[in-house]
Image (cartoon, rainbow, N blue to C red):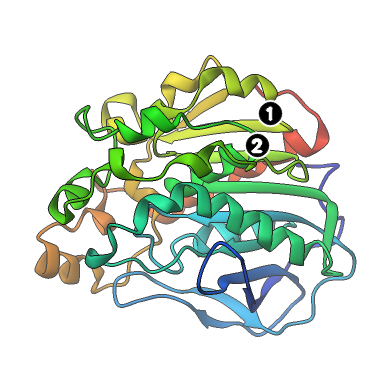
Amino acid sequence: MAGFLPAVAVAGAGVEQLEVPVAHREAAVAITLFYPAGDVETEAVGGTAVFAPVDAAPGAVALEGQHPLVLLSHGGMRSAPGGGDWLAIRLVKEGYAVAVVRGPALGPADATRAPAELWQRPKDMSAALDVLEEDPRVDPGRVGAVGVFLGGTAVLQLAGARLSAGAVAGACEAPGQSMDCGWFDAAGVSLHDVATGPLEGPLQEGRVASVVAIDPEFAAAFETASFADLSGTAHVLNLGAAEDVPAALDAAQLAGAVAYGRVDGADRFDAFPECTGRGPAILAEETGDDRLCTGLEEHDRAEIHDRIAEEVARRLGSGMLGADITQ
């Protein structure tokens, strides 16, 4: 990242909570902006009984100058608040200001609303950029986007990749092609009945120079030819070995159309925050499955998070600098 990032050292992260009214939702979009700060006194931000918080300083004075901006969208159709904060904090340490654009809290009864997230998430990120490009802490000429799961789908759409409405409608007909088919079936929701016309609307965001999608959902529904018309650079990462990536998150089929790579030693559960000491037991008791905390096998999630963030920063920087990274 040398030559791209600010010369001053980033000691800590400031944080600010924002809300952006949008026409396409009933409620404003919540944004958590993390930004480079100096030697500040931090406190625990976010976190749940299962997932650990991050350390940041609310309202801290930002380091002088304008910082490259990353729009970050984390999670699937039922994303949890704070899921991407671990990555945001690490990217701040690399010199970025990071706007975590949060999806709505959808519960078991919200399956009918969920498919609209396919086009609302990228619109959320564009709306966030409309506001943030006026922020004096942000350099509007250096903007990237990172997404995880459905957030990964969204950032590819921002770059100009298009989902096929027909492929989305049929996603639950092929085993394992969507993470939410069981939820939809239980709620009586058929993707064939969902109005997918907005997928064909203008979702590309020309102000975003570089995107990185991690384990994007609905990869099989992208129109491969649309990757020829991207407005910036796009990279896709899968977490872990091919045999450990579920079909619904397998983006290897896009390797011929976009720069593709893997983070070895990781698995899809490493996209989530580190867990509290009680986290695994809470999950085991409530769901019978503690893999959100323990992963597919025992390893150091913090170390994996460092490697994911390093890979993301390298690829983001390549797009903003115009360098060529093909793997």
The one of 138 and 200 positioned closer to us in this rendering: 200
Q: How many marks?
A: 2
Q: Position of residue 106 (x, y in %)?
A: 34, 66
Residue 313 at x, y percent in the picture: 65, 44
| Kind of residue at badge 2 | Ala
Residue 261 percent location from the top left of the image: 51, 27
- The residue beneath circle 2 is 159
Q: Which quadrant of the structure image shows residue 53?
A: bottom left
Tell me which residue sits at (47%, 27%) in the image.
222
Task: Point out the image quarter for the C terminus.
Answer: top right
Question: Which residue is the site of mark 1?
Answer: 230
- Mark 1 residue element: loop
> Which quadrant holds the N terminus?
top right
Which disc, if any, is residue 313?
none
- Work out whether mark 2 precedes mark 1 in sequence or the reverse, and give the earlier one: 2
Q: Residue at x 16, y 51 (%)?
A: 188
Q: Quadrant of residue 244?
A: top left
Q: Is residue 327 left or right of residue 245?
A: right
Q: Is residue 187 above or below residue 323?
A: below
Q: Mark 2 falls on what kind of element?
A: helix
Estimate how packed mark 2 is, as few (under 14), some (14 to 19) or many (20 or more) residues with alpha carbons within 10 Å: many
